[in-house]
Image: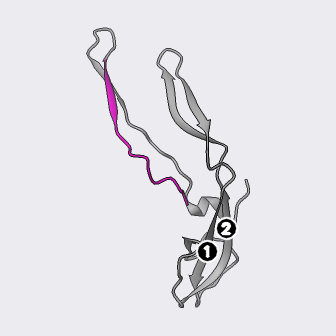
């Protein structure tokens, strides 16, 4: 349930760390994104397919919820990490798509419709 498909991840490194300057620091990014099940209510323990609005759903599926996600005001475009203080600071820029709504639909098998699916507003 993310609309950004353009970013290409690359691991980088810098040499020269440590008392003798022979230690390499690797920048291995770890992205921790919530799963759709963490973003929604009514999906736990139920087979659920979430698709962008406009996708055709198979007739064996039943519509169980409308989900709208709104793009944030800012993008993180970089960060700075200070090895002396262990401070991590994000660099942000305005998101040109801020407040853009993206619609998704939740579906379940007809044989197991379960509860209505909603976004968890927390």
Residue 44 versus residue 100 in the image, above or below:
below
Residue 67: give its label.
2
Q: Quadrant of residue 75?
A: top right
Let me know if residue 11 is in the magenta part: yes
Question: How dense is the environment of label 1, judged by Cα within 10 Å: few (below 14), some, or many (20 and up)?
Answer: many
Q: Where is residue 122 in the image (x, y as percent from the top left)?
A: 73, 53
Spot the residue most to the left: 22
Instruction: Identify the secondary structure beneath mark 2.
Output: strand
Q: Position of residue 77 (x, y in %)?
A: 52, 36
Q: Distance between the residues labelled 2 and 1?
A: 7 Å
Mark 2 in CB contact with mark 1 (< 8 angstroms)? yes
Residue occupying image coordinates x 58% and y 81% = 108
Residue drawn 51% across the image and 30% down it: 79
Question: Badge 2, how many Cα within 10 Å: few under 14, some, many 20+?
Answer: many
> Picture coordinates of residue 33 (x, y %)?
53, 51
The question of residue 14 being in magenta is answered with yes
Locate the N terminus and report the quarter of the image it occupies: bottom right
Q: Which label was assigned to residue 94?
A: none
| Residue labelled with disc 1 | 106
Q: In this view, does 45 lie above or below 7?
A: below
Which of the 4 image quarters holds residue 10? top left
From this viewpoint, which residue is outermost toward the top?
19
Q: Which of 66 and 93 is in front in this view?
A: 93
Where, by quadrant of the figure, is residue 100 drawn?
Answer: bottom right
Query: Residue at position x 32%, y 28% from top?
Result: 13
Of pointers 2 and 1, the one earlier in the residue sequence? 2
Which one is nearer the viewer's eye here, 50 or 37? Answer: 50
- 122 left or right, relative to 10: right
Q: Residue at x 61, y 45 (%)?
A: 96
Stretch in magenta:
1-15
From the viewer's perspective, is 16 left or right of 83? left
């Amino acid at each position: 349930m993310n609309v950004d498909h353009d970013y290409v991840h690359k691991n980088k490194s810098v040499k020269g760390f440590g008392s003798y300057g022979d230690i390499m620091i690797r920048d291995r990014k770890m992205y921790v994104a919530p799963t759709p099940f963490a973003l929604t209510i009514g999906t736990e323990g139920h087979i659920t397919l979430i698709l962008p609005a406009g996708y055709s759903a198979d007739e064996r599926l039943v519509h169980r919820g409308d989900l709208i996600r709104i793009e944030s005001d800012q993008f993180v475009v970089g960060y700075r990490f200070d090895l002396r203080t262990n401070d991590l600071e994000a660099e942000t820029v305005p998101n040109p798509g801020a407040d853009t709504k993206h619609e998704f639909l939740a579906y379940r098998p007809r044989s197991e419709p379960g509860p209505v699916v909603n976004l968890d507003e927390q």
